[in-house]
Amino acid sequence: MDRHYNRGHFSSEGHQNRFKQERSSLKRGREHDRGNEINARRARPNECVSSLQTMSVLRQLYDRDFPVYKQPVEIGYFSLDSKRKFWNDARQLRYYVEPEKCPNFNLRDGYRDRFVKRDDSIKEKLDHILRWILANRHKVQSKNVTCPVGVDFVTWRGHLTKLLTTPYETQEGWLLAVSKLAGTLYISEVETEYACRNRDNRTERHEEMMYWGYKFEQYTCADEAQGCPDSGGVVNTNEAFCTVVQTRLAEHKLLFSGEVDCREADLQAPQAPACYIELKTSAEIHTPKQRSNFHRYKLLKWWAQSFLPGVPKIVAGFRDNDGQVVDVETFKTSQISQLIKTEYNCWKPTVCMNFCSDFLSFVRETVREDDPRTVYLFSWDPHKDVTFTIHRDSEYSFLPDWFVKEMTRPLCETPAPPRTCN
Ligand code: A3P
Ligand code: MG
């Protein structure tokens, strides 16, 4: 994307105000240097006068035609085992077993004695995706030597989900670290102070309720296509099966990975990702207000999460306050936007996708240094604009040496792809 395209695109659609130049704060010498950190609002040597400093999140700026979003294609997958070890295969993929309409599953069962919880203080950053890229270089390698991974962005699906829902988010902000390596931009989340505090101060009830979603998965998934769920087994949240998909949003080529709960048990079902199913739990709905909240807040997150990787079906277990599943409903991802249309002033998929696309343009405009040790930290808090700071050799660097070394090796030195395929 070049500047000319950018200008024409933005001005012709009248959205110049999405990216703002903070003229007053660009006055030289007002902010002091903070070691290696450079604040976005301070003019840097060689900085282009018209560089874009902040980005607005106002919904009305993104309410235009739906952007091009190519059907996501699965280019691979990987598994994480009970010890969180990476495997370049589908050993953790599970198969959906349809429950009864009112199954009375007890989601509290096993919380005390059959639960191994992943240590969520360990920040894995993009490491598993990077491992997958190295193990599958032949699948992602482009002929363009200046950009050996043939995409503009590499990230987790969950980070993109946060971007999609940003125009409607009023509670939680985010921090996204971005580094450019060999022409590709890598986006990795940094935990905010607010999220860290919430993680440390969860109530016992909240801790238990976080288990309920995984327990529902255990009741509805089998390890083999013809198998039965084992509700007496251990729930271990280290285990995961992740799809790796490639797609394009407007002019941005994306490669991202996301955890997949299960697939259709019928092996004749369409190819991945069309055979994948997302499992969810939610409080049962009794009142119109509860239904409206479900549409406004839950379905937005569910839609964004499944739409991105092209997962067509969401199976929801509605549970009472004691963790008993009293109703199971299936939602087609493609029909969610129709379902919510009756809500007054509700969220719009086009706003979500256009915001995400424009944020990625903003990142491309901003991140100029192709250096894995430089991190551009994009920051957003509810009711504010997106801003950024630049950090060199800081705690935010996230591309590991083992990855950088391999990716910067000349192509002729690249080892031949492994013969075995999964
Ligand atoms: P539910 O979404 O059914 O509550 P996912 O649905 O994304 O596959 O996540 C599986 C489960 O992980 C969730 O099931 C929930 O139990 C837990 N979980 C995921 N993200 C969470 C979050 N941000 N806060 C609390 N629990 C979370
Ligand atoms: Mg799920």
Image: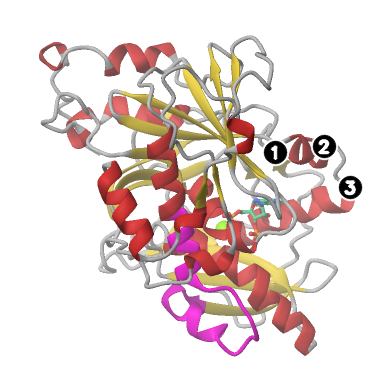
Question: Which element carries disc 2, helix, strand or loop?
Answer: helix
How far, Cα to Cα, is label 2 from label 3? 15 Å
**Residue 259 horizontal/vertical position (percent):** 48, 48
The numbered mark at residue 197 is: 2
Query: Which picture quadrant has residue 58?
Result: bottom right
Label 3 crowding class (10 Å Cα cut-off): few <14, some 14-19, many 20+? few
How far, Cα to Cα, is label 2 from label 1? 19 Å
Q: Is mark 3 within 8 Å of ligand 1?
A: no
| Image quadrant in which the C terminus is located | top left
Q: Residue at the location (41% across, 18% down)?
A: 372
State which image quarter holds ligand 1: bottom right
**Residue 244 horizontal/vertical position (percent):** 35, 45
Query: Which picture quadrant has residue 200?
Result: top right
The residue to which callout 1 is attached is 117
Q: Looking at the image, what colour scheme do you see?
A: secondary structure
**Residue type of the residue flagged with mark 2:** Arg
Q: Residue at the location (33% across, 51% down)?
A: 7
